[in-house]
Image (cartoon, rainbow, N blue to C red):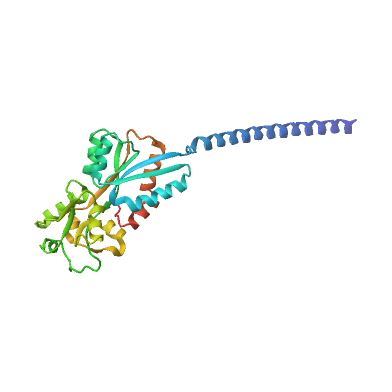
Amino acid sequence: MTRSVRRTHRIRRTARVAGAGAAALLALSACSSSSDTDSDSAGASSSSPKLSGQVTVFAAASLKESFTTLGETFEKQHPSTEVTFNFAGSDTLAASITGGAPADVFASASPKTMATVTDAGAAAGTPATFVRNQLEIATLPGNPDHVSSLEDLTDSGLKVVLCDESVPCGAAARKALDASGLELTPVSYEQDVKAALTKVELKEADAAVVYKTDVKAAGDKVTGVDFPESAKAVNDYPITLLKDAPNTDAARAFIELVKSAEGQRVLTGAGFRTP
């Protein structure tokens, strides 16, 4: 009789333990399911939308080589996108934007030309400076005229080209000349820095005042000469999303690439300075 009672008690205890274990398993399963659902939901909410379509970037002529490289990088990162560029003098680009030309991003060679766009209410948000650039003298290969200073360019026997003062490289050159107290009469004023450099590359001019980045991009087609007055005329380059950008998401992503460590590596490799 006693053994029968003990056996009954053991069976009941076993049943209670089994029931408790089953309840715990059910609870754990429910928690796991809830956690998985939450995780999936969090992952879905944190994933960025797939970028696609065309991104139109208006950029200063001096950015041509580095931005072309970054455009190719962007398209590899986002295969459904296409980056198109309009490279020209910053003032020309600013006038096009304020005149209604469709574009997503504007990268200017100076805050002054960027102000043309922001003052017209065509920019979305505050432009950010992403690089800086400094002037350098570009001479014929090997520097046959032995140019060693900005003052040497005032020699009447030299054919010198400057950017027009309405564009950033020309305004910077004017600032450097004023700082040194020099007067220089060029054979021509060009509407962007690439046009000024081309005059030397084609041997139509003996020298031009351009950016360090342009001298570097030209390779052995020209020889670069530093001059101390250039330190007084360093240009900041701002970039902004445009208010009526047709492809806002992709435009923001391109700007982030430009400002990223990878973008800065490409830009400094081209001769730009960090802000």
Give 82 or 267, whichever is nearer the viewer. 82
Quarter residue 208 falls in: bottom left
Q: Residue at x 49, y 37 (%)?
A: 46
Residue 176 percent location from the top left of the image: 15, 55
Is 89 located above or below residue 211 in the figure? above
Quarter residue 137 falls in: bottom left
Regarding residue 275, the answer to whether it shows in the image is no
Is 91 located above or below residue 214 in the figure? above
Q: Residue at x 59, y 34 (%)?
A: 37
Residue 132 percent location from the top left of the image: 27, 51
Give 36 or 149, whichever is nearer the viewer. 149
Is 146 located above or below residue 92 in the figure? below
Regarding residue 154, the answer to whether it shows in the image is yes
Horizontal side of residue 72 vs 267, given as left or right = right
Horizontal side of residue 29 vs 146, given as left or right = right
Q: Residue furthest right?
A: 1
Q: Residue at x 30, y 57 (%)?
A: 271
Residue 147 percent location from the top left of the image: 17, 66
Give 57 or 270, whichever is nearer the viewer. 57
Horizontal side of residue 95 vs 50, given as left or right = left
Q: Residue at x 16, y 59 (%)?
A: 160
Residue 50 percent location from the top left of the image: 48, 38
Quarter residue 220 falls in: bottom left
- Of the 4 image quadrants, the one containing the N terminus is top right
